[in-house]
Amino acid sequence: QVQLVESGGGLVQPGGSLRLSCAASGSIFSINAMGWYRQAPGKQRELVAYFTSGGKTNTADSVKGRFTISRDYAKNMVYLQMNSLKLEDTAVYYCNLRSYSAASGWTDYWGQGTQVTVSS
């Protein structure tokens, strides 16, 4: 099993910054992808930024130039630096890890989510 624990959410004014962290623990196979999704009220969960299993990053157009994802492979952690936050960035942010094993194929794991609220 894999556990993901997010931290760093909160309330911030428009234009402000927050840094989210996600720590992964448990049975993490070497082939994995990790990153962030978000879900705003009444909307579907959407990808924010992600490290593929090959180490490349995917970032949503809506946050490019403002959000930066980084990863510490040794510590099994992923971070999301969010700058120039906008009202529309308000959402619950979820950490995701997709892990591959020969026995099970790809398996998705999710954190409990951390609330980010951008408000004046």
Image: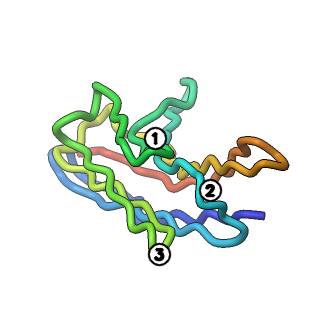
Type of the residue with mark 1? Ala
Q: Earlier in the sequence, mark 3 or mark 1?
A: 3
Residue 47 x %, y %:
47, 33
Name the N-terminal-most of marks 1 and 2.
Answer: 1
Q: Which residue occupies 39% across, 68% down?
A: 72
Q: Secondary structure at mark 3?
A: loop
Q: Secondary structure at mark 2?
A: loop
Q: Are marks 1 and 2 in contact (CB under 8 Å)?
A: no
In the picture provided, is 46 more to the left or to the right than 69? right
Q: Could you say which disc has been placed on residue 43 in the image?
A: none
**Mark 1 residue element:** strand
| Foreground tag (2 vs 3) | 3
Taking 21 as reference, is 31 above or below it?
above
Between the residue at mark 2 and the residue at mark 3, the CA separation in whole angstroms equals 16 Å
Q: How is the image coloured?
A: rainbow
Residue 73 versus residue 102: which sits nearer the camera? 102
Q: Residue at x 68, y 48 (%)?
A: 100
Tell me the quarter of the picture where residue 29 sits. bottom right
- Residue type at mark 3: give it: Lys
Which residue lies under the disc numbered 3? 75
Classify the position of the C terminus by image quarter: top left
| 10 Å crowding of disc 1: few (<14), some (14-19), many (20+) | many
Residue 86 vertical placement versus 13 (above, below): above
Number of labels in the image equals 3
Tell me the residue that label 1 is attached to.
91
Q: Which mark is residue 111?
A: 2
Question: Label 2: how many residues lie within 10 Å, few (<14), some (14-19) or many (20+)?
Answer: some
Question: Mark 3, mark 1: which one is toward the viewer?
Answer: 3
In the displayed orientation, state which residue is furthest to the bottom.
75
Residue 46, x across and y down, in percent: 50, 30
